[in-house]
Image (cartoon, rainbow, N blue to C red):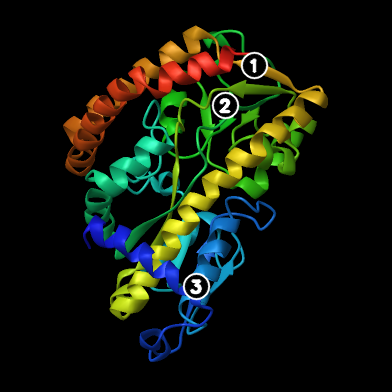
Amino acid sequence: MERRSFVRGAGIAGVLAAGTAPAFVQAQANIRWRLASSFPKSLDTIYGAAEVFSKKVSDMSGGKLQISVHAGGELMPPFGVVDAVQNGTVDMCHTVPYYFFGKDPTFAIGAAIPFGMNSRQMTAWMLHGNGLKLMREFYAQYNMISFPGGNTGSQMGGWFRKEVKSLADIKGLKFRIGGFAGKIIERMGGVPQNIPGGEIYQSLEKGTIDAAEWVGPYDDQKLGFYKVAPFYAYPGWWEGGPEVDFFINNKAYDALTPEYKAIVEAASLSAHVDMQAKYDALNPGALKQLVAAKVKLMPFPKDVMDAAFKESMAVYSELSNSNPAWKKVYTDYAAFLKDQNLWFRFTEGQFDRYMQSAKL
C-alpha cells in the first residue's frame, strides 16, 4: 500500500458530516473484529486511542465494521499481542513496537530509539519518507501490516526513588524502561526491567525496582508514581517521539473490501493525531499539580546524557554490522533524521528556545 493511498484514505472521514453511511458502505458485509491493547483502561490517552479508532471505524462504516477493544491482560498478556495478531488469535492490536525488540531490534525503529526523531519528524518519515514502506516490509514477516496509531510526544525521563547526581548513580540501578532503551541503560551499568504499565507502581512501592519510566505527567499522575518515587527526571532521551501502532493480521486485512480498507486507514490517522493532541493539552496541568505535590524535578546530569548518547551510537553501529534488517531501515531513518535536525535547528529549535525563555 502506497503512503499516498494512506493519506487519501483519510478523505472518507467526510462521510461523517452526512450523518449516514453512503451507498457503497451500506452494501458491505458486517464484520466483527477484536483489538487487543497493551495498555490498561485507566490510561484514557494511550489506551483511549484504540477507542477513538474503533468509534471512527463504526461511524464511517455505518456500524457494519465493528471493532471491540480489549485492555491489556483481558485477552492475553500486554506483551503477547503481537504473537496473537501474527497467529490470528485476534484480528489486530494496539501497542508500541519497541516492546518487541527481543524478536528483532528493528521493531524499535518503528516506535522510538534513543536520541532519535521527535514526533513530527517521525510522522513525516512515516507518511512522506520511506518509514511506512520500510516498516511494513519488515512487519510482513510477522504476518501483519502496520498503521500509525498515536504518538505521545517527547516523554519524561521517569521516576526515581533516589536522586541521580552523576553517571555513577546509574550503576546497578534496577530501572523499568520500555523496550530497546534498556540495552543502553545496561551498557551504562544499569539493570533494565521490562514491566507492563499496570505493574509498575507495585514494583516501585515494594522496592523491586529503583526507578521507572512511563510516558509523562498526565499518565504518570494517574498511575500514582509520585507517591513512591519523589524524583522526576527529564528528558526521556530514549523517546523523543514514540509512535504507537495498530497491527492488523494480514489475512484479516486482505479480506477487507477497498472501502473498508480506506475506513481503517482514515480512522487510524485520526487516532494518531488525536493522541498527541490530548497529551499536549493535558500534560502541562498535570505537571503543575505534581510540582504542587512536592515532586522534585530532576534533569539528567550531563555525564549521564553524554554516556547514553555514546552508547546509543555504538549500539546502532554494531547492529548495522550484524543485522541486515536493522541496517536497511536504520540507514534510511538516520539520513532522514539528519536532514530534519538541520531544518529544525533554524526553525523549531530557535523558536522554541526563545519562547521558553520569554515571559508570557
Tell me the number on the disc at residue 16: 3
Q: Is residue 10 above or below residue 354?
A: below
Q: Which residue is outermost to the right?
A: 293
Looking at marks 2 and 1 on the same chain, the residue that comes earlier in the sequence is marked by 2
Look at the image and tell me in which quarter the C terminus lies: top right
Q: Which residue is mark 1?
A: 298
Looking at marks 1 and 3 on the same chain, the residue that comes earlier in the sequence is marked by 3
Q: Helix, strand or loop at disc 3? A: helix
Q: CA distance from mark 2 to mark 1?
A: 9 Å
Q: CA distance from mark 2 to mark 3?
A: 40 Å
> Can you see residue 30?
yes
Tell me the number on the disc at residue 157: 2
Q: Quadrant of residue 184?
A: top left
- Asked if the residues shown at circle 2 and circle 1 are in contact, with their CB atoms under 8 angstroms apart, the answer is yes
Residue at 46% from the left image edge and 79% from the top image edge: 61
Q: CA distance from mark 1 to mark 3?
A: 46 Å
